[in-house]
Image (cartoon, coloured by chain):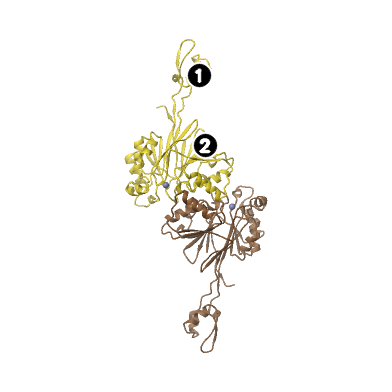
Chain colours: A brown, B yellow
Amino acid sequence: MQITFLGTSSGVPTRSRNVSSVAIRLPQRAEVWLFDCGEGTQHQLLRSDVKISQIRRIFITHLHGDHIFGLMGLLASYGLAGNPTAIDIYGPPGLSEYIRASERYSYTHLSYPLKVHTVQPGLVYEDEEFLVSCVPLKHRVTAFGYRIVEKDRPGRFNVEQAAALGIPNGPLYGKLKRGEEVTLSDGRQIRGSDLCAPPEIGRKVVYCTDTVYCDAAVELSQDADVLIHEATFSHQDADMAFDRLHSTSTMAAQVALGAGVKQLIMTHFSPRYAPGNALVLDDLLQEARAIFPNTALAYDFLIHEVPRRRGE
Amino acid sequence: MQITFLGTSSGVPTRSRNVSSVAIRLPQRAEVWLFDCGEGTQHQLLRSDVKISQIRRIFITHLHGDHIFGLMGLLASYGLAGNPTAIDIYGPPGLSEYIRASERYSYTHLSYPLKVHTVQPGLVYEDEEFLVSCVPLKHRVTAFGYRIVEKDRPGRFNVEQAAALGIPNGPLYGKLKRGEEVTLSDGRQIRGSDLCAPPEIGRKVVYCTDTVYCDAAVELSQDADVLIHEATFSHQDADMAFDRLHSTSTMAAQVALGAGVKQLIMTHFSPRYAPGNALVLDDLLQEARAIFPNTALAYDFLIHEVPRRRGE
Ligand SMILES: [Zn+2]
Ligand SMILES: [Zn+2]
């Protein structure tokens, strides 16, 4: 899994940071999932290694403009990018109506199937390899945090070793692959787990924006490999964070700490911390690291590889 | 008057050309008028010398996404750019509904008065210095071309000369300034035009997009100083132009020739003519120049000063 930050500013774009969007490339398939789609996301894609034609699903946290105003342009361009297959979009109530109204007024006729799913807290999407769930966050409007979970996979079955043990190819292999114990015709007992590599533990990535500190974010983030959490404000501007229901850097770190994640990457920064101001993003980073050391600052086009976990 | 091209690609943005928008700076006031507002227009403004805070009016030609998907983001950012006054938007039927629906779904609360005017063919806007009119073009959806006319101004009245002639300061001055003839108490006849510099002829800029060749465009463009006309296709791809109701380079040139404009600037180019293709924009330029020599190609961030005209 490879995370590409396409926009890391809150509210308005700046010269160096666009408004919110994060792309996650799935390793097992040539597929990209997008999280939020602020204005100019398709422009950022043009400047990145992520191909618009590989986007298959888009998850929207909430309907504030800096998270959705790039959606219509991206959907239109996706249809012109060659061999569009289909796009599924997931988001809060109102998203479907917004898209349908925009399509209607702008005479946008998409050449591929577009499905808009209104999410509910809980399971949002599942296939053989992944599942995505969401929880409501605490923002001025309905907002959801998303958890992307790669399912655990059994370790590779050692066919050579099985053959050397004289186990006949056939239905027994299936049982052993699933880790079960089997009894051979000569009475030998073989444990499947002895013939399998340690299972591959699925990776977990959590995307939490926009929100003030909330317990739901901690629950959603349990044991995540990577927590992407908004940090609009510095701890010193906590009053603004509470007022506008956004997070400070320290709130993001507290979520990371409480959830026992492996790494925190902060994003969605107020332009007020651009270089040259009294407080800058490095201050937010230090504030967060004092609570949760393994913290990083996102920037546009940052690529973060989430390493595979082997059985632990 | 200073024209800044903010986006010169048709349909989709490319790495070097954004979708449609043109800013016109008015010389007499610190005011900018925008024509069309494709996605990413506010980003282009950040990279240009045009200040978002100076935008006062926005004219929309038609509701295709590549001409309006930057509107909501721009309106939201304008409100945050410091001292927003008011914005008036002009465009075809449906524009107001599109904006109101987008505001509603995205919870956008603008902090300044926004007025949306549905235009009719004819006069669109008038003040002491300018008037803007529009005509329907020939596109797949309702589309308008706009003509911006700076009103003629009387030449400067030579007060020193009037005093030297012994004309008493007072109501006679007003008549002379208007170019009228007056009779002094001593019987002398004085012609106002002799005391005034030649009148300043107002400049005319026409913005024609999207459209296939049409007589209405020629009428709208009569005697313009600058005609900005779309040229989505090469003459060699005229079948596509007729099919999609867009212009070729030669159609743009024919409008310029028929209207007797001073200069043609072509824009809204299909990405198919990007460098490296069989046909490139220089081919479109040559095609147009064969018909109308004073033709130029727009590119993003091109600034074109429209010179003042003195009495001719
Ligand atoms: Zn928000
Ligand atoms: Zn169009």
Q: For residue A57, which numbered disc appears in the image? A: none
Report x, y in % for residue A158.
50, 79
Q: Chain of mark 1?
A: B
Circle 2 SS class: strand
Vertical comparison of A118 with B236: above or below: below
Residue at the image point whose x is 47% and y is 84% from the top: A168
How many C-alpha atoms fall within 10 Å of the one at disc 2: few (<14), some, or many (≥20)? some
Which label was assigned to residue B31?
A: 2
Residue A93 in view of the camera: yes
Q: Are marks 1 and 2 on the same chain?
A: yes
Q: Pointers 1 and 2 in contact (CB under 8 A)?
A: no
Where B209 falls versus B157 (above or below)? Answer: below
Q: How far apart are the two marked residues, 1 and 2, measured between alpha carbons?
A: 32 Å
Left or right of residue B281, residue B63 in this image: right
| Residue behind label 2 places its C-beta within 8 angstroms of ligand 2 | no
**Mark 1 or 2 closer to N-term?**
2
Q: Is residue B262 left or right of residue A89?
A: left
The residue where tag 1 is placed is B173
